[in-house]
Every structure is written in structure tokens, then in C-alpha cells.
Amino acid sequence: MNFDEERKTMVEVQLRGRGLKDERVLKAMEEIPRHRFVSKEQEQSAYSDHPLPIGEGQTISQPYMVALMTECMELEGNEKVLEIGTGCGYQAAILAKLAKEVYSIERVEKLSLKAKEILAELGYTNVKLKVGDGTKGWEEYSPYQALIVTAGSPDIPQTLLDQLSEGGRMVIPVGGSFSQELVVARKRKGKVERRKVCGCVFVPLIGEFGWKR
Ligand code: SAH
């Protein structure tokens, strides 16, 4: 199987074909080997138009959703960004290409360790991972110019808003435990503007300021 070809087709058909335009995001999606982040059994489906299981009952989002969420972060290259839900580390790798520093929190240690391994193998040096409850954010390195939550939350955790810089963007699926709306929240002059992007389905964000379980 020619993964490079598959990746090119994925970008043309699934991303560009559906209206995504941020050239930096499209380039990152074309370069990063998504198949390296999933198990051998899933490798053949790595560039298909759907989410994939990554173990521990969790999933990696469909390529379109990864690209759409990243586009909504409006990254130019100098940002410090925070991701909640490292999972297999694929989204973190995309962010590492597009921002200056990436901080990512995962509650399942096993997933975080695996992500760390592959990110090191692929040579990313600007990603820092931590195991813990991401609904509390990562105060130490805040504020962040952009923040992405890759699990569904009942609401936007205030702690995360507090760690966003002025003008910062947060992308987060908000809603019930089975389906949500993708929301972009932007901090402007201390106020929070919210914009709904589309419907989506994510695994639940479990933590103090998310779902209690
Ligand atoms: N961005 C990931 C997608 C992972 S799916 C990727 O590219 O693979 C969402 C992840 O969020 C799951 O791994 C889940 O364990 C994690 N998660 C759920 N609640 C969390 C919380 N409170 N803090 C950190 N991670 C959480």
C-alpha cells in the first residue's frame, strides 16, 4: 500500500474537496504519517474517511474533523497551544508542525506513553505531554493562544477559558455524551464570543469540569 499516495488523495478529496482552505493545515495533513499513529491492524484504514479505534475504548477523529478543528485554531506558527486528549498523538503532531510549542494532556497513561514514543520516533521536539485531568488545564505554561479539546464536554470549562490569552481561540465539542456541536470560543476584550461550526461525535471528556463518569 502506498501511504503517500493515499495521504495525497485524502487531502484532495476529503479536505480540499469539502472546502478546507488553510494551506498550512493541508500541508501538515499531507506530510504527517497518520498510519504510524494507529495499530498495525488499523494501518490499512488510516486514510479512510472515518474515525479509528486507538485502544482503551478511545478513537482518533476522522481526518476531516482533525483538519477542520485545526483550521478553526487559526495558527500562524508562533503560538503556544494546549490540547486536551492526547490520544494517539496524531493531532498533537499536526499542531507541532503549525505552532511553536504544544502542550497536551491525556488521562489514560497507556495512551500518553504510546503517543510519547511515536512523537519521539518521528522527531518532534516541541511537544510536551502530561498524564492527568485536562479539564483543569495546564496552568504552568498558560496563557495559550489556542486550545483544542478532542473529547466531548457538557460545557466549556471555565478553567480552560481562564488559561486562554486575549484574542485566543478554543475549539471544543460541546453537548451530550453521544453527540455534540463543535464550538469555537474566542476571548476578546475579556469577553467570550462563541460560534457553532457543525455537529460532531466525540468520546466523553471525563474529569472534574467535564463528565463525572
Ligand atoms: N487528539 C486525539 C484524539 C483522542 S480521543 C488523537 O489525535 O488521537 C480523546 C481522548 O481524550 C481520549 O484518549 C481520552 O482518554 C481523552 N480524555 C478524556 N477526558 C480527558 C481529560 N479530562 N483529560 C485528558 N484527556 C481526556
Image (tube, helix red, strand yellow):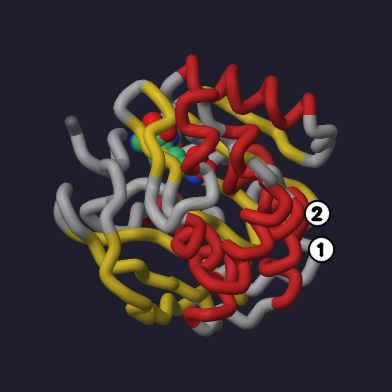
Is 52 on the left-hand or right-hand side of 181? right
Q: Can residue 4 be seen?
A: yes
Q: Tell me, for residue 183, which label it has, or none.
A: none
Residue 82 percent across, percent down from the top left: 59, 49
Q: Are marks 2 and 1 in contact (CB under 8 Å)?
A: yes
Q: Secondary structure at mark 2?
A: loop
Q: Which residue is mark 2?
A: 100
Q: Secondary structure at mark 1?
A: loop
Q: Residue at x 29, y 35 (%)?
A: 206
Q: Which residue is mark 1?
A: 78
Q: How many marks?
A: 2
Question: CA gap, disc 2 to disc 1?
Answer: 5 Å
Q: Quadrant of residue 129?
A: top right
Q: Quadrant of residue 182?
A: bottom left
Query: Which amino acid, by three-letter code, is at mark 2?
Result: Lys
Q: Residue at x 54, y 34 (%)?
A: 43
Picture layout, residue 53 above or below residue 79: above
Picture layout, residue 159 above or below residue 73: above
Where is the C terminus found, in terms of image quarters?
Answer: top left
